[in-house]
Image: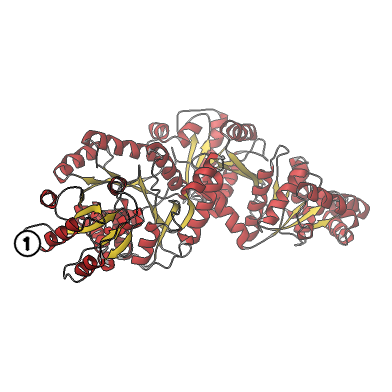
Amino acid sequence: MSKAVYIATMESGSGKSIVTLGLMRMLLGKIAKVGYFKPIISDFKNKKKDNHIDTVCKHFQLDISFDEAYAFTKSEALEMQHNGEQNKITDYIIEKYKNLEERFDFILVEGTDFSGEGTATELKINSDIAKNLGIPAIIVESGSGKSMEDFVNNMYAAYDLFKEREVEVLAVIANKIQEKNSSWIYKELRKKLPKHILVNTIPTIAHLINPTIKELKDTLGADVLIGKDRLHLEIGNFVVGAMQLHNYLPRLKENTLMVAPGDRSDLILGALQAHISDNYPRLAGILLTGGLIPEPAIIKLIDGLDHKIPILTINEGTYKVANAVSEVKPKIYAGNTRKINLSIQAFEKYVAVDELADKLITFEGKGITPRMFQYNLLKRAKKEQKHIVLPEGKDERILSAAIRLINQNVVKLTILGDKKKVKDRLKKIDFDFDTTKISIINPATSSQFKDYAKTYYELRKHKGINLAMAEDKMEDVSYFGTMMVYKNHADGMVSGAAHTTQHTILPALQFIKTKPNTSIVSSIFFMCLEDRVSVYGDCAINPNPNAEQLAEIAIEAAAASTAFGIEPKIAMLSYSSGNSGIGEDVEKVRKATAIVKAKQPQLKIEGPIQYDAAVDMKVGKSKLPDSEVAGEASILIFPDLNTGNNTYKAVQRETGALAIGPMLLGLNKPINDLSRGCTTDDIFNTVIITAIQAQEI
């Protein structure tokens, strides 16, 4: 898995470009291939693309196109959020990020730089993206215009929000602070923040907070009259020329921009003389207002000077232009190598580079977020398309899920049922759907019917089954679909939307059978909670497993979790934790835990343990302080079906969690059961995990 870091801020103007450029230089010195991603960018103004992407990709010569480097513009993201489409935003950001992850060893992700959205919106958007990408964050904030106390409290509040969202914060960087305040701010942040978080302060650097003539030109839409090669000069301040020259000259300071009407030749020539004089400071440039241009003779005189400065013209009046000049914000752009190098130098001077590099490179994420988990499932299923049979062609939910699966090119499908009726139902759901993309088979009229019946007869004749009875069985869609899997005419089957669990899995138990050294079929659910994915088992099959069966369920669940990218940390649930309880039920769990430890000593397992101690770190460590599982269990094994089934349904209904499954474990080939209360999403996800199971065989 690629590594990455998210650079987050609370508001626009934080100066995070310094951190982005410095980090990129540092990473390129330590890692072969570094990518760059900015999930949400500012809206295009005058068809100009995002300056951050352009600067980073061009300066560091990254092999990333502009379109690859972002997912949404600000307006697109806010409109979708307003329309309740947050999941679509997240899914597409994950998709774009994962595309880069395949190509690069490390990805630097730069957060939003909205203006006018407010701290709360900015923080929430950034923390949500970092959380769903499953990457740590560096928080950057500007101290400009804030009291030291407010600034420190704001930075801690930002850290606290990311912590609440379960985003690991590696460092905070206090930027644009007065150098005399650096020590106090560092000490106060160090007091408030945990010791493992790096704290760095970067003072205000004048050359980085001053806009250039180019930025002025681009922001105001001014035209260059003279000095196109000098647009990189910085503007330290500006003075409006509305007075006589002798009153104007004393107001000049280093890097002043003169703003004056274009017909004030006296001020223009006086300012240029001051610029080349040893007795006056150098100017940054001249901005002529009112759409007025000096006489040709004046232009000729200026053009012949050795020490040229940029002269720009603009149509608006002096008053309006002066107000606009005061609002021009400094930016770092690809051509301004001086500012880029100054940014990198500042980062290297004021940030603990080696410590930060070590944290970034060695960071290991905890668990996987629900949206990332679902994305990974979909991508894995698409990578090697499998053929799944859906026996319940009369169920509208099955058909709706089938249309989604085919439209997204996830799997190949066969639906069982009357061909005309199934096609008519598909068209009713989606008139434009191409029904030829799905194979539809009526078991009774299938060319395979006789062969399937004969095969079933041969497999079950020792149980008193004759050929006529076998043919009756093959008219049942559950038996026919299971036989398709047995005969390798399909890779897996999903059923149960309109049938009981027994009806779905009985054929599989009869002739798909269990794997070698497996005594039972069990099940797990992938529970996509708000901030993590947990595995629940067994919640669908075994009413009251004994200790040996409970141990087998735990081992099978651990293997399945690993196959799906979840580190197994097993909690064997009971009504007591550790050695605190006695009784037949708790002893069963204690014995099952011991069996797992004996058979699979490498597995992290704790039992007996209560649910709260298994998932809540504070409770877990208070009850079992030395446990590797308490407080961070990823697999929860319930002692019986009554507990497991009710718990998964209670969690699903009360929290809105997505329950993917049940996924059956222990069979030779993937057959999965649905709840009769399942949704189209449930069916869609269960087909995906069935396809992934088939890939593993």
Q: Is residue 668 visible?
A: no
In the picture, the quarter occupied by the N terminus is: bottom left
Is residue 203 or residue 153 the one in the foreground? Answer: 203
| Residue 494 in picture, x, y percent from top left | 72, 49
Residue holding disc 1: 278
Q: Position of residue 293 (x, y in %)?
A: 29, 60
The residue drawn where x is 48% and y is 51% is 73
Judge from the rendering whether residue 425 lies leftward or rightward of residue 653; answer left or right: right
Pick out the residue farthest to the right.
468
Work out which quarter of the rendered image holds the C terminus and state it.
bottom right
Going by the image, does 246 lie left or right of 13?
left
Q: Is residue 177 visible?
A: yes
Q: Horizontally, is 472 left or right of 252 in the view?
A: right
The type of residue carrying mark 1 is: Asp
Residue shown at 53% from the left, 47% from the top: 89
**Residue 19 to residue 502: above or below:** below
**Could you tell me how many numbered marks the image carries?**
1
- Residue 227 image position (x, y, % from top left): 26, 66
* Quarter of the rendering containing residue 517: bottom right
User: In terms of depth relative to the viewer, which is nearer, 240 or 44?
Assistant: 240
